[in-house]
């Protein structure tokens, strides 16, 4: 089976010509299978977001390539929708919720009736059927992130990339949104890549966990999550399997962090740029 | 507002039927007083001016408001309205419109091409800093004393604030918003009309406000210096005859024109930046 998203030897060095070049990623190899849910974790500053931006086509890798359905990408691929942590800045405040959702479709010249139907379907899917005519800033943070998810769904992608999407909402909203994303993923048979710094979340949501670490960042560990596909905030999180996985991921993140610090000690020039 | 320690709902705090703390009441009293001052002061000043003859404080140079209003219909009659007011208003609106369209167009081009912008910015700043009035005589020689000259003078003054503010606004568009547009593969047309221009609109509108004020200064100056017809022309003719009451009617007429145009602009601004107010109000609460 072809990987939906194949990350092949991806390296990324930032060089603005002024400061010394900073190598963030090196030799990242990973394949995301169709309909798979992968969490990406790593200590802060490990380059999780950079990797996600490379996959989304917003950054060009300086080495290696990213393939979607076997085709190397150059620029943001049509098959992928990206959801940002900062919903307040990813939704356009001068457009209503409906206009925000349909803007990518208008740009694709889809017919007005199709667009309206897609927007309605997407808003229903995220549980906001009556919010189409409101402006994003009239909604709560959690609702705004739902709108951002609805916009992604209406775009009709094969894969969702999410960059710490629930980091700016309260705990209750957060678990609601987690379950919403799991529902949507099942309903739309979507491939999902989720960057998170929350270990519980990474285990609860995923089929596999990609642990990033080292300096420059590479794949530190890949941990399969052998929990039943049906997840529940209470019962799943209280199983011994969940607890064991959580400990395993935490350990992997910690050891990758120690590894990073050790390598930083050995190479003083990389300390100065960090 | 920020000193208030009580947590209030994000919806209009004044309209809420919550308990009236003494603090809230005193604030309400203060705003009522401000309201009285706001509308009362101009009325009092107008009343004093109106009865200035009776108070014995008028001079040849400062006639009373009563005298000015009495002369008003004589100076601004059907003939002058058609011959002078129409060309002046036409020149203001035309000059302002050309400044806005060209300013936004070029500003957008410069904002989207940072290299070109960097290269041209010192020159543009120079033009903005230059008092355009200095070039009025040149425009008169080049374009004569008609509509072309007036519009030329206005555009030469009013285009810069629009252009530079547009460039600023375009360059300041939020990175996440731009990433969103790229990620959803928005075509240039949709990217510009639905992201860049709206995002830059608070800055563009601020530039347009300055441009409108500039337009009104330049029209009067150009008409005072040399012109065959216009509000400034009427003022200039009356000055020649030492008819100061007529001069005052001209000043008042222009003040009314300026007031009405800025109110109309305010309404436009209120409409176009409604989202901005909503967003802002939310962030403050």
Image (cartoon, coloured by chain):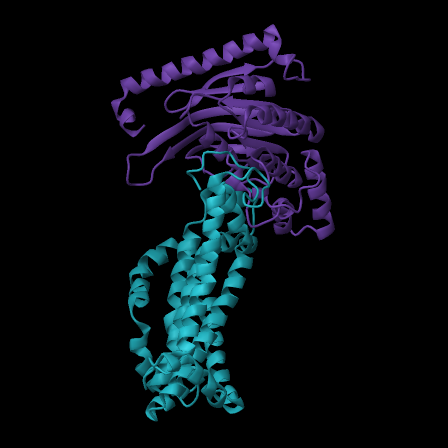
Q: Quadrant of the N terminus of chain B?
A: top left
Q: Nearer the viewer, residue B254 or B146?
A: B254
A248 up-or-down from A219: above or below: above
Image spot of residue B252 (x, y percent): 43, 78
On the picture, is A53 further left or further right than A189? left
Q: Quadrant of residue B255?
A: bottom left
A71 up-or-down from B272: above or below: above
On the picture, is A219 further left or further right than A1? left
Residue at image coords 34%, 81%: B56
Extreme bottom residue here?
A: B241
Q: Nearer the viewer, residue A68 or B146?
A: B146
A115 up-or-down from B220: above or below: above
Residue at image coords 41%, 38%: B3
Residue at image coords 43%, 78%: B50
Residue at image coords 71%, 42%: A120
Image spot of residue B82 (x, y percent): 52, 88
Tell me how many marks there are.
Answer: 0
Q: Quadrant of residue A175?
A: top right
On the picture, is A37 further left or further right than A125? left
Q: Quadrant of residue B64?
A: bottom left
Residue A206 seen anywhere in this rendered image of the structure: no
Judging by colour alone, the chain drawn in cyan in this rendered image is B
Judging by colour alone, the chain drawn in purple in this rendered image is A
Image spot of residue B41 (x, y percent): 42, 65
Image spot of residue B169 (x, y percent): 43, 54
Residue B78 seen anywhere in this rendered image of the structure: yes
């Amino acid at each position: 089976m072809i990987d939906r998203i194949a990350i092949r030897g991806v390296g990324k060095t930032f060089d603005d010509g002024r400061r010394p070049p900073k190598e963030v990623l090196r030799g990242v190899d990973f394949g995301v299978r169709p309909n798979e849910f992968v969490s990406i974790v790593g200590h802060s500053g490990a380059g999780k977001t950079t990797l996600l931006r490379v996959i989304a086509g917003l950054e060009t890798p300086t080495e290696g390539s990213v393939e979607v359905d076997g085709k190397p990408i150059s620029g943001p691929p049509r098959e992928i929708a990206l959801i940002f942590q900062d919903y307040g800045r990813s939704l356009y405040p001068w457009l209503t919720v409906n206009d925000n959702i349909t803007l990518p479709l208008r740009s694709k010249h889809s017919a007005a009736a199709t667009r309206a139907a897609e927007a309605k379907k997407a808003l229903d899917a995220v549980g906001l059927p009556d919010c189409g005519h409101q402006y994003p800033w009239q909604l709560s943070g959690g609702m705004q992130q739902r709108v951002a998810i609805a916009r992604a769904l209406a775009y009709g992608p094969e894969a969702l990339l999410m960059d710490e999407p629930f980091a700016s909402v309260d705990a209750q909203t957060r678990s609601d949104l987690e379950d919403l994303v799991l529902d949507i993923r099942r309903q739309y048979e979507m491939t999902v890549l989720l960057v998170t710094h929350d270990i519980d979340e990474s285990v609860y949501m995923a089929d596999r966990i990609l642990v990033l670490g080292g300096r420059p960042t590479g794949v530190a560990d890949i941990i399969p999550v052998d929990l039943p596909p049906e997840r529940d905030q209470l019962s799943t999180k209280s199983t011994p399997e969940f607890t064991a996985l959580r400990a395993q991921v935490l350990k992997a993140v910690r050891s990758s962090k120690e590894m990073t610090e050790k390598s930083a000690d050995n190479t003083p020039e990389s300390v100065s740029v960090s | 507002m920020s000193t208030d320690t009580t947590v209030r709902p994000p919806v209009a705090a004044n309209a809420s039927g919550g308990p009236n703390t003494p603090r809230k009441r005193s604030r309400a009293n203060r705003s009522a007083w401000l309201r009285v001052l706001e509308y009362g002061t101009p009325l009092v000043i107008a009343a004093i001016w109106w009865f200035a003859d009776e108070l014995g404080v008028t001079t040849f140079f400062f006639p009373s408001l009563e005298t000015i209003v009495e002369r008003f219909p004589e100076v601004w009659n059907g003939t002058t309205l058609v011959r002078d007011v129409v060309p002046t208003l036409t020149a203001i609106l035309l000059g302002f419109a050309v400044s806005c369209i060209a300013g936004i167009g070029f500003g957008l081009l410069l904002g989207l091409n940072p290299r070109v912008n960097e290269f041209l910015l010192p020159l543009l700043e120079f033009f903005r800093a230059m008092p355009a009035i200095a070039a009025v005589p040149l425009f008169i020689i080049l374009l004569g004393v008609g509509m072309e000259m007036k519009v030329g003078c206005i555009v030469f003054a009013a285009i810069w604030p629009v252009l530079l503010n547009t460039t600023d606004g375009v360059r300041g568009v939020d990175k996440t918003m731009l990433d969103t547009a790229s990620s959803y593969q928005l075509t240039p047309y949709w990217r510009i009309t639905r992201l860049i221009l709206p995002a830059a609109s608070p800055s563009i509108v601020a530039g347009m406000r300055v441009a409108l004020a500039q337009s009104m200064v330049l029209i009067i100056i150009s008409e005072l210096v040399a012109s065959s017809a216009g509000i400034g022309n009427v003022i200039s003719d009356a000055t020649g005859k030492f008819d100061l009451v007529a001069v005052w009617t001209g000043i008042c007429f222009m003040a009314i024109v300026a007031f009405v145009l800025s109110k109309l602009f305010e309404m436009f601004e209120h409409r176009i930046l409604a989202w901005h107010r909503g967003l802002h109000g939310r962030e403050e609460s």
